[in-house]
Image (cartoon, grey):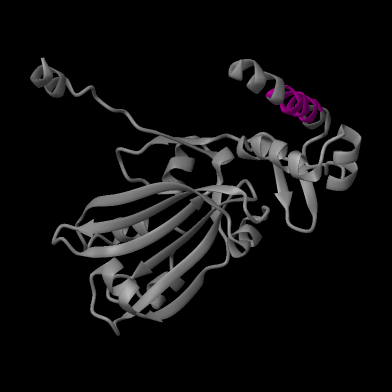
Amino acid sequence: MDSNFKIENQHPFQMLQAKLAKLIAETPPGDRLPAEPELAKKLGVSRATLREGMRTFEGQGLIRRRQGVGTFVVPQTRVIETGLEVLESIERLANRIGLKVTMGALQIKEIIAGVEESEKLQVEEGTSLVEVSRVIYAEGRPVAFLTDLLPPDILTEEELANGFTGSVLDFLIKRGNIGLVKSFTDIQAVASSPEIAKKLEIQRGDVLLLFVARLYSDTGEIVDFSHSYFLPGYFRFHVVRSVGESVYSKAN
């Protein structure tokens, strides 16, 4: 009884998604879809229901909603796909599939470490830190927003102004004076804040994939604390895991 009830309630939403899929397929890439009030009226649904239906296609990278501008059909692009066992930059991953990525305006800010920052980077309160923020574009479209927090002796403003293309990891590896050994990364889905939504040209509240990472040197120091926000439709991450045979053996 409960199962039938769920199916009946899902049916209108499935019908909505089918209509949206047809509309998107019939709209030339780069063109704007009808305005939200007009489209909701045409499809016979509320604007809230329409937004929910749109999220599926936005997550697949088929459409992009731009705050205050409208919803556009996105030309098909290659997806950056990788495993998470090895740490690599977006630039390296994109180059592997022949996808051109570029960095937007670089924002560099000096921050004095408070309690939160001192815990993140294991430095004393009052330490001067460098915050580096930028948007990464793939084929002219913003696909990621990256923020790195670093001790000033790791990466200087002068170095950032000369030869920095977007990846702190690649820059440190190329410079070669710090042995990098591992990254501890927390992964979660988050709702986009108004600030990040504006940078990525999406709607506030849209779902993003967030990587919060600490990069460690061979001496055990945290040399970089980063937040990386990815648009789901342009990235696909996977993990290869082995079966814990020893656990099952002990259980038996």
- Is 86 located above or below residue 5 in the figure? below
In the picture, which quadrant includes the C terminus? top left
Left-right relation of 78 to 19: left
Q: Position of residue 6 (x, y in %)?
A: 64, 22
Kindly identify the residue that appears in the image at 75 percent across and 44 percent down: 48
- Any part of residue 84 in sight: yes
- Is 6 located above or below residue 119 in the figure? above
**Range of magenta residues:** 10-22
- Is 9 located above or below residue 96 in the figure? above
**Does the magenta-highlighted stretch encompass residue 186?**
no
**Does the magenta-highlighted stretch encompass residue 13?**
yes
Left-right relation of 155 to 106: left
- Is 123 located above or below residue 70 in the figure? below
Q: Main secondary structure of the magenta part?
A: helix
Kindly identify the residue that appears in the image at 90 percent across and 39 percent down: 41
Left-right relation of 42 to 71: right
Kindly identify the residue that appears in the image at 42 percent across and 80 percent down: 110
